[in-house]
Image (cartoon, rainbow, N blue to C red):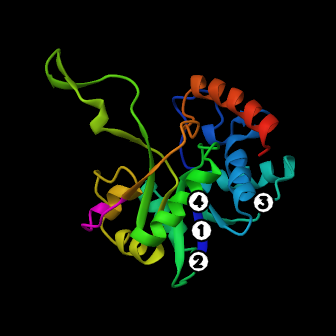
């Protein structure tokens, strides 16, 4: 079984603030997306990484690689106008291997655990598609009208993470579809074919870093992970 991970890093980072896109802002002295890539490579050095960046960020990436002596082997792909099209471009870099599995991961999620990554690939090998999810801890309310809400049972909902992993043949078929706005992640693209997506228990540390508060949390997590197990 050949493993691929497409790392999508095309966000503008407007909620993060600052001139630098969020994927290049520093987490404990290193660009965030580099921390993510190093984490994935540390878990499985044989896994082929494909980094998808907007065209306007490719030269910046090359400069940062020199500045930070970044040496993780990867394939660089140019992003598209939407995340959907960026994943399409990443998929074009995947070899046609019968037993290949492809994960799609957010470039600003540097704390996926080894267990979650391995379980997503293992479940996708059996079921065709697997995504990590975690329980909702806060109470939820549904907006039912102007200035009106109603409580909903939180045990019926899950928060979805990445990497979302699929058999290559399934993911290719899914991304041959025409883009629609309801495609919020890769699982929704696959489900549009009528295919089932299985769930794997995620790890709560696997946060998506999109705000300054998230970065504060990430710095604490980074210090803990580095001291306990390395990255």
From the image, state whether disc 3 or disc 4 is nearer to you: 4
- SS class, disc 4: helix
**In the rendered image, is residue 6 in sight?**
yes
- SS class, disc 3: loop
Measured from the top left, where is residue 123 in percent x and y?
47, 64
Say above or below: 229 vs 50: above
Residue closest to the eye, 72 or 98: 98
Residue closest to the eye, 149 or 86: 149
Residue position for label 1: 4
Measured from the top left, where is residue 68 in percent x and y?
84, 47
N-terminal label among 1 and 4: 1
Say above or below: 134 vs 175: above
Relative to 185, 77 lies left or right: right
Alpha-carbon distance for marks 4 and 2? 12 Å
From the image, state whether disc 3 or disc 2 is nearer to you: 2
Mark 4, residues whose alpha carbon is within 10 Å: few (<14), some, or many (≥20)?
few
Residue position for label 3: 72
Residue position for label 2: 1
Mark 3, residues whose alpha carbon is within 10 Å: few (<14), some, or many (≥20)?
some
Q: Residue at x 24, y 30 (%)?
A: 153
- SS class, disc 1: strand
Q: Quadrant location of the N terminus? A: bottom right
Residue closest to the eye, 192 or 136: 136
Residue position for label 4: 118
């Amino acid at each position: 079984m050949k493993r691929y991970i497409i790392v999508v890093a095309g966000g503008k980072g407007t909620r993060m603030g600052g001139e630098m896109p969020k994927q290049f802002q520093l987490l404990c002295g290193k660009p965030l997306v580099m921390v993510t890539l190093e984490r994935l490579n540390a878990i499985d050095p044989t896994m082929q990484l494909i980094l998808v960046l907007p065209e306007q960020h490719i030269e910046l990436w090359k400069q940062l690689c020199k500045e930070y002596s970044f040496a993780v082997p990867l394939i660089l792909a140019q992003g598209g106008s939407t995340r959907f099209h960026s994943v399409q471009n990443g998929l074009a870099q995947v070899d046609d291997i019968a037993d290949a599995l492809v994960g799609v991961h957010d470039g600003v999620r540097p704390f996926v655990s080894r267990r979650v990554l391995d379980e997503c690939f293992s479940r996708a090998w059996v079921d065709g598609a697997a995504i990590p999810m975690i329980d909702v801890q806060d109470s939820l309310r549904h907006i039912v009208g102007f200035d009106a809400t109603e409580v909903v049972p939180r045990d019926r909902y899950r928060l979805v993470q990445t990497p979302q992993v699929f058999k290559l043949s399934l993911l290719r078929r899914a991304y041959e579809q025409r883009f629609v706005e309801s495609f919020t992640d890769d699982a929704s693209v696959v489900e549009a074919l009528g295919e089932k997506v299985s769930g794997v228990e995620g790890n709560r540390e696997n946060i998506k870093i999109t705000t300054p508060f998230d970065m504060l949390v990430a710095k604490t997590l980074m210090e803990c992970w580095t001291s306990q197990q390395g990255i």
